[in-house]
Image: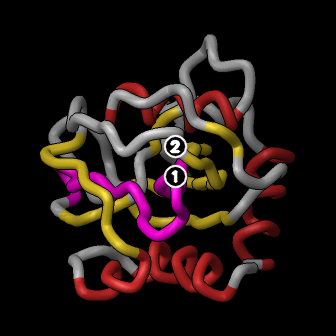
Amino acid sequence: MSAFLERMCALLEHSEAPFSPEQLNPGHFTASAFVLSPGSEALLMIYHARLARWLQPGGHVDPGDPDLVETARRECGEEVGRTDLVLDREGVFDVDIHTIPETAKRSQHEHFDVRFLFRSPTREIRAGSDALDAKWIPLQAIAACESDASVMRAVGKLLRGA
């Protein structure tokens, strides 16, 4: 994680627009929400349309977002219909830098993802925007679903109580 933090600090220091989705070299900041169920036994996951795997809700920073926590909360509203999330832990829960494949509109670039831990007051959700599906997956079962190493790293933190 220290390598991620070093690269994130360098992006902040040397970039004119580190939060703009238009900055593609090397990339830009995004924000994600790891959302625990009310009883903390499950994690809210979306099946991402373009990336074709189960991931946490999250996405690009919009110009009107006051901070990255609110970016993550807004993205949850767009992707699963929940904005009434309670920040479960102050500060950043996890960070990750991952490559986003080239599309017809954008070249390959990196997302410098800042992740926050929330708790939902209810299990009511609905898939929307980039999410083909949304569901609560028990923490112990996430390893069996098609996800990625960064999600498993965060789940490992949750299982260890870190």
Q: Position of residue 18 (x, y in %)?
A: 67, 38
For residue 43, side relative to residue 101 (left or right): right
Quadrant housing residue 68: top right
* Quadrant into which the N terminus falls: bottom right
Question: Vertically, is 135 above or below 127?
Answer: below
**Residue 13 vs residue 158, the one in the foreground:** 158
Res. 18 in view: no
Circle 2 residue: 120
Taking the spot 23% from the left edge, 79% from the top edge, the residue there is 145
For residue 19, side relative to residue 41 (left or right): right
Image-based side of 93 in relation to 43, left or right: right
Q: Secondary structure at mark 2?
A: loop
Q: Is residue 152 magenta?
A: no
Disc 1 marks which residue? 38
Mark 2 vs mark 1, CA separation in Å? 6 Å
**Image quadrant occupied by the C terminus:** bottom right
Q: Residue 88 in the image: x percent, y percent?
A: 71, 51
